[in-house]
């Protein structure tokens, strides 16, 4: 197993509260070599915070604890900064949401790529430049030699994202974290970026954590799916099974809101409003008691407001094993 995380908890010190705010609660998951894990959930679900913790990039106000956070033989919670420099960027790489802010607008593409490559690989400047050209060509950037001389503000959003991907894969990482890599890109470019990530995953036998709001994306590209809500995993399992038979009301509501979704053999009548989930994800310092989704759930009962709701397993202990955090699981099928 490449990555094993057990009972990851993230707190933040805050002036709003005498006690640290509990942002991510008892997160447990694993990732195999060469596997793609899709992570979905609304903004505020804790997806990016979890990934930043795995990269050791959270601020000093964060308190990160876990029973286990092992990556390829490293205990991520015990790494010193010098040790992080060998893991971060070399073994674990990340594509950030907004390439226009992740790239330095004052430095050329060549400077940033060469700096990244030489920081992790023992290459001369000339060899690093040659590798940069090769990588830009691999990610589909035309005239890569000329593009090296460009500055980020001279690139389109799709081009800048491709540069970010090229930088991320420059050291052949074992794990690539793609944190909403298609944000603010048009649909055509989104498809190209996602196909590129999938191709690189298969070519390099690279593991990928794909974070997105789009269930259509993860259903097409990921092998396993993890649904997060308010800092907790509410459902996880094989993507095809989970998308067809969601058990948690939150997963069910997300899938039912897609255009063209068929719920329990009933297709939405054309030109009628799409189903939506009322309310918003609670802020970290305003969590409800019991099930975190209960204020927005149509199946909520008194039991849902009493104490912590444990995650339960279902099915055989193999790749199709399902887990969900609900005492009133859904029976309806979606397609």
Image (spheres, helix red, strand yellow):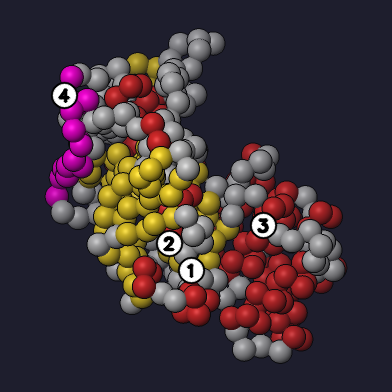
Q: Secondary structure at mark 2?
A: helix
Report x, y in % for residue 67: 25, 62
Q: Secondary structure at mark 3?
A: helix
Q: Quadrant of the N terminus?
A: bottom left
What residue is pinned by disc 2?
A: 54
What residue is pinned by disc 3?
A: 102
Q: Are marks 3 and 2 in contact (CB under 8 Å)?
A: no
For discs 1 and 3, the disc positioned in front in the rendered view = 3
Asked if one can make out residue 324 in the rendered structure from this viewpoint, the answer is yes
What residue is pinned by disc 1?
A: 92
Question: Which residue lies at the image location 35% right of the left edge and 50% below the top edge?
Answer: 224
Q: Quadrant of the C terminus?
A: top left
Q: CA distance from mark 1 to mark 4?
A: 41 Å
Q: Earlier in the sequence, mark 4 or mark 2?
A: 2
The residue segment tinted magenta is 302-316
Q: Quarter-wise, where is residue 119 in the image? A: bottom right
Report x, y in % for residue 296: 35, 21
Is residue 101 found inside the magenta-colored segment of the image?
Answer: no
What residue is pinned by disc 4?
A: 303
Left or right: 83 as drawn, with respect to 249: right
Question: Which residue lies at the image location 18% right of the left edge and 28% below the top edge?
Answer: 306
Q: Secondary structure at mark 1?
A: strand
| Front position in the image: 62 or 43 | 62
| Front position in the image: 99 or 303 | 303
Label 1 Cα crowd, 10 Å radius (few <14 / some 14-19 / many 20+): many
Q: Earlier in the sequence, mark 1 or mark 4?
A: 1
């Amino acid at each position: 197993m490449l990555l094993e995380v057990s009972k990851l908890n993230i707190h933040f010190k805050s002036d709003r509260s005498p006690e640290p705010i509990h942002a991510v609660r008892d997160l447990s998951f694993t990732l195999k070599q060469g596997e793609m894990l899709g992570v979905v959930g609304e903004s505020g679900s804790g997806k990016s915070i979890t990934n930043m913790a795995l990269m050791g990039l959270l601020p000093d106000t964060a308190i990160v604890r876990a029973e286990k956070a092992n990556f390829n033989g490293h205990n991520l919670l015990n790494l010193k900064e010098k040790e992080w420099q060998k893991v971060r960027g070399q073994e674990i790489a990340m594509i950030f949401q907004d390439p226009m802010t992740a790239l330095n607008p004052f430095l050329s593409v060549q400077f940033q790529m060469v700096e990244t490559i030489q920081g992790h690989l023992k290459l001369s400047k000339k060899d690093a430049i040659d590798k940069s050209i090769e990588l830009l060509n691999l990610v589909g950037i035309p005239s890569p030699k000329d593009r090296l001389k460009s500055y980020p503000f001279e690139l389109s959003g799709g081009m800048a994202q491709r540069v970010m991907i090229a930088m991320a894969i420059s050291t052949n990482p074992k794990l690539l974290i793609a944190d909403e890599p298609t944000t603010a890109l048009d649909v055509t470019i989104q498809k190209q970026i996602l196909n590129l990530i999938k191709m690189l995953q298969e070519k390099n036998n690279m593991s990928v954590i794909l974070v997105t709001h789009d269930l259509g994306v993860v259903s097409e590209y990921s092998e396993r799916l993890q649904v997060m809500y308010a800092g907790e995993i509410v459902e996880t399992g094989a993507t095809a099974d989970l998308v067809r038979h969601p058990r948690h009301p939150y997963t069910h509501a997300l899938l039912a809101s897609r255009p063209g979704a068929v719920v329990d053999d009933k297709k939405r009548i054309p030109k009628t409003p799409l189903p939506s989930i009322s309310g918003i994800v609670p802020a970290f310092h305003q969590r409800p008691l019991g099930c975190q989704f209960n204020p927005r759930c149509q199946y909520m009962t008194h039991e849902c407001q009493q104490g912590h709701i444990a995650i339960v397993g279902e099915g055989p202990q193999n790749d199709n094993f399902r887990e969900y955090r609900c005492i009133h699981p859904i029976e309806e099928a979606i397609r």
